[in-house]
Image (cartoon, rainbow, N blue to C red):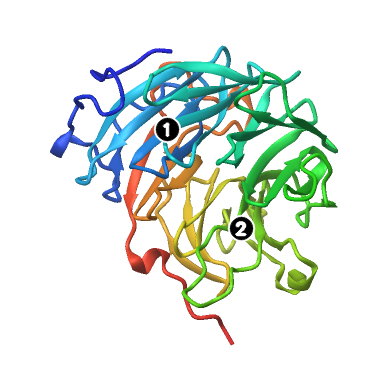
Amino acid sequence: MALFGNSTSFGAPQQTLGNTAAAAPSGDVEVSQPPPDGISALAFSSAADFLAASSWDNAVRVYGVEPNGSTAPKAMYQHEAPVLDVVWSKDGSKIISAGADKAARLYDVQSGQAQQVAAHDAPIKSVRWVDQGAGILATGSWDKTVKYWDMRQPNPVSTAQLAERCYTMDCVWPYLVVGTAERKIQIFDLQQNPGVPIITMDSPLKYQTRVISLFQRQPEPGQPTPPPGFAIGSVEGRVAIQYIRDENKNLNFSFKCHRKDPPAASREPQQLFCVNDISFHPVQGTFSTVGSDGSINFWDKDSKTRLKTFDSKGSPIAASAFNRTGSIFAYAVSYDWHKGHSFAPPSGSNTNKIFLHSCTDEEVKRRPKKI
């Protein structure tokens, strides 16, 4: 574990940027001291405006975000290989990260110490808290398993065999959904049996699954909780909205995004780009998609409406996250490896950046359903 900037722990004196914070052409604020290598995931604390970023340089970095939009490096800790995912505990006291070193590590915010808490036989691609009250963690790996860990025990409390390697995973109690190689999707009901999926299905999309994100939205006052489901993004510039319960299957649909049409007189085919990340607004239930084309879109699945399209950033957007109130949207401009190693930027080129966008109600608010 190491620290960076001039901070010694969370809450210590900050490197205040004030008006020196760099801004993107759109006016979005650039986070200071971004990772020097590819950014794999972003996650905001649910307790305060702290942003964690995992990176291919084997590190997890944490930044504080001030009300005026300035940012300050707060802490950093290491894996022994590229870090592929990162999440916070519900109370904001711990960070869990997963890496190509076949390990998951827990960083304690108060003590500033990191320790290994999970292990697999192959790189761990995804990590999620599944029962935050009891401290139960799920890790999804390329060894074709999901393992559940009690932070008080050294061995997994349960293991689920997957159809293939885990490519993406998300959890909103009581459901955990895993997208694997060969376009398989496996859904677990954690209240029934976390070791056996209740559904194993092919993805409704024709090409490789890139990301799965479960719906997140608080119910309206006096209204029932919205039906559970998830969004799937693929490498072909398409997203599917999928509901878990049979009675809601009629609501399933898919749509095209992150595509580029050729000039009108051209015979060239349409360009298709990877959907790299999908993030749901914690209040509105609307969501973002980011892609290899460098674009960002906000959507309302219920009204099937595109709410906002951002100007292209000129490089792939690898990861995204809303903060706990949905007032800040973070996104990482970073090579996403969709063209392999030969197209990666040269070492030291400093092409990786994280930006913060201040969200307006008009950008994220749900629209009336179309009749």
Residue 59 appears left or right of 371? left
Q: Residues within 10 Å of mark 1 (few under 14, many from 20)?
A: some
Residue type, label 2? Ser
Residue situated in front as seen by the camera: 178 or 21:
178
Residue situated in front as seen by the camera: 279 or 332:
279
Residue 49 in the image, given as x and y percentages of width and height: 33, 42
- Whether residue 239 is visible to the viewer of this picture, yes or no, is no
Residue 244 in the image, given as x and y percentages of width and height: 74, 61
Q: Which residue is mark 2?
A: 266
Residue 19 appears left or right of 273? left
Q: Which residue is mark 1?
A: 93
At a point 78% along the width and 52% down the height, the residue shown is 203
Q: Quadrant of residue 327?
A: bottom left
Q: Marks 2 and 1, Cα distance to the nearest angstrom?
A: 55 Å
SS state under label 1? loop
Q: State which mark lies toward you, 2 or 1.
A: 1
> Which residue is situated farthest in the bottom direction here?
371
Q: Residues within 10 Å of mark 2 (few under 14, many from 20)?
A: few
Residue 324 in the image, given as x and y percentages of width and height: 40, 50
Q: Quadrant of residue 363?
A: bottom left
At a point 72% along the width and 26% down the height, the residue shown is 156
At a point 58% along the width and 34% down the height, the residue shown is 135
SS state under label 2? loop
At a point 82% along the width and 36% down the height, the residue shown is 162
